[in-house]
DNA sequence: CAAAATTTAAAACAGGTGTTTGATTCTGGC
DNA sequence: GCCAGAATCAAACACCTGTTTTAAATTTTG
């Protein structure tokens, strides 16, 4: 039968998620995954088919609830008829990211770490998978953001969008490390929500600049 | 003799530089490096000691001229006595990056790609190496930048500094990919200097925002 | 209950990894 | 010309990789 998701599958996904986020894809072997999951080595290839497919499955479990939550948040905003400002859109994005993930028992920091990996590690198949599966939502959000920034020419807008993505993914995927440095140097510790509250105005300013 | 740097060493460094930037560290084997360099497999361990040491050597060849050029640019600015503005500092940083590297026959894009890897790949030894070797220059630059931003409290400043680093490294290390997308969608092609000219005002705005 | 399909298990497979070895060639100083 | 030291080479080493196989156990179903 196909109700298979008894245990083994989830345990593999759980272990893979943590280990991938900690060490990367190539640096994490199937043997490490299966042994920390407490299942047999062959189980990965049996249930997922290959290591690549496992990597994609890990991302699917993250991204699907996130994307759905973002879509319905955008629907809600659109239904309200109110104009969408840049701050609101970014705030929504971050709030949804934090909310939907922790609801599903997923660690937002790990999520960002994995997202960072998806962009920087050399896994062509992953990039293709993500684009084909979640590209529409991405384009919708980007379109709304562009609409909230009249007067910024398209090419400049897209570069700035990438600047923003970079700032976000890079910073949040190394959140632990950066936070540790700042705590050591200034004693003040920052939480993830606090950091996002710093990020929203900073990213907004970057998107809005009027070239002089 | 110690004049050894006849050929083999540089050829290994050249090949490793390109291959690392293209595929990452773990994904590039010593056999691939030595065969594209046209040298014997054992040469890496003979001249460098280990793969880790080779990785560090690749970064040293990039970062030392860059850091030196940046330091002397900062010296020059300091000697002039003029106050240092944020735009100037960022402009210097990027201009020096472009200039000093291409002078030494090194590809700036590859440099950014490698720098991105250094941050995102899981090579503890590399991070430690870079921090211990180039940490002082980094702190000097960060200090000058902080001085040009009175009124921004230290913790906020440092978070924004990381936002900026993220935007820079992330964007430039994927420059080719992003540029290809934008060219396909808008027909307009962007050069690296052009992109840096977009980045300077955007990053400046992000650093300067006054929280409302 | 028995037959069939699904899931687990141990072992082997084929190939790739960084590193080391020991012999051989090259090279510069006397 | 000779010979120590440096550099190159082919081969082997020990280990790890993802994947497959074959058999046993388990679960589902008629």
Image: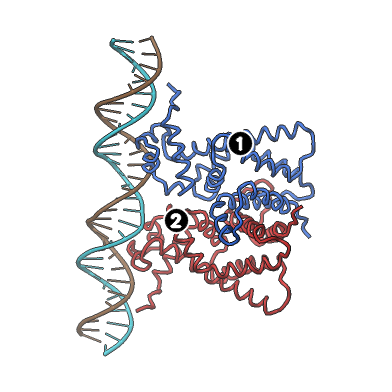
Chain colours: A blue, B red, C cyan, D brown
**Residue B199 visible in the shown view:** yes
- Which of the labelled discs sits on residue B25, or is there none? 2
Q: Residue drawn 39% across and 55% down?
A: B29
Q: Residue drawn 63% across and 74% down?
A: B73
Image coordinates for residue A25, horizontal then vertical, percent: 45, 46
Crowd rating for badge 1 (residues with CA inside 10 Å; few <14, some 14–19, many 20+)? some
Q: Is residue B91 left or right of residue A81?
A: left
Residue under circle 1?
Answer: A100
Whether residues under marks 2 and 1 lie with C-beta atoms below 8 angstroms apart, the answer is no
Residue A97 lies in quadrant: top right
Q: Nearer the viewer, mark 2 or mark 1?
A: 1
In front here: B70 or A122? Answer: B70
Which quarter of the figure is the N terminus of chain A placed in?
top left
Crowd rating for badge 2 (residues with CA inside 10 Å; few <14, some 14–19, many 20+)? many
Q: Chain of mark 2?
A: B
Name of the residue lying farthest toward the front: A187
In front here: A157 or B192? Answer: A157
In the image, residue B210 above or below residue B186: below
Q: Is residue A153 left or right of residue A168?
A: right
Image coordinates for residue B123, horizontal then vertical, percent: 45, 57
């Amino acid at each position: 039968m196909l109700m298979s998701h008894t245990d083994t599958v989830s345990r593999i996904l759980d272990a893979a998620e943590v280990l991938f986020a900690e060490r990367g894809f190539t640096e994490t072997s199937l043997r490490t995954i299966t042994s920390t999951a407490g299942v047999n080595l062959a189980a990965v290839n049996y249930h997922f088919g290959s290591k690549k497919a496992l990597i994609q499955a890990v991302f699917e479990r993250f991204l699907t609830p996130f994307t759905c939550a973002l879509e319905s948040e955008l629907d809600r905003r659109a239904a309200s008829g109110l104009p969408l400002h840049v701050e609101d859109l970014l705030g929504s994005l971050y709030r949804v990211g934090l909310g939907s993930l922790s609801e599903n028992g997923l660690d937002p920091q790990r999520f960002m770490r994995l997202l960072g990996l998806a962009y920087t590690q050399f896994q062509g198949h992953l990039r293709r998978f993500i684009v084909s599966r979640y590209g529409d939502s991405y384009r919708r959000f980007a379109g709304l953001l562009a609409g909230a920034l009249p007067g910024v020419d398209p090419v400049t807008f897209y570069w700035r969008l990438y600047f923003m993505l970079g700032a976000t993914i890079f910073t949040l995927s190394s959140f632990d490390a950066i936070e540790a440095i700042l705590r050591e140097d200034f004693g003040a510790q920052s939480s993830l929500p606090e950091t996002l509250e710093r990020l929203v105005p900073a990213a907004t300013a970057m998107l809005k600049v009027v070239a002089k």
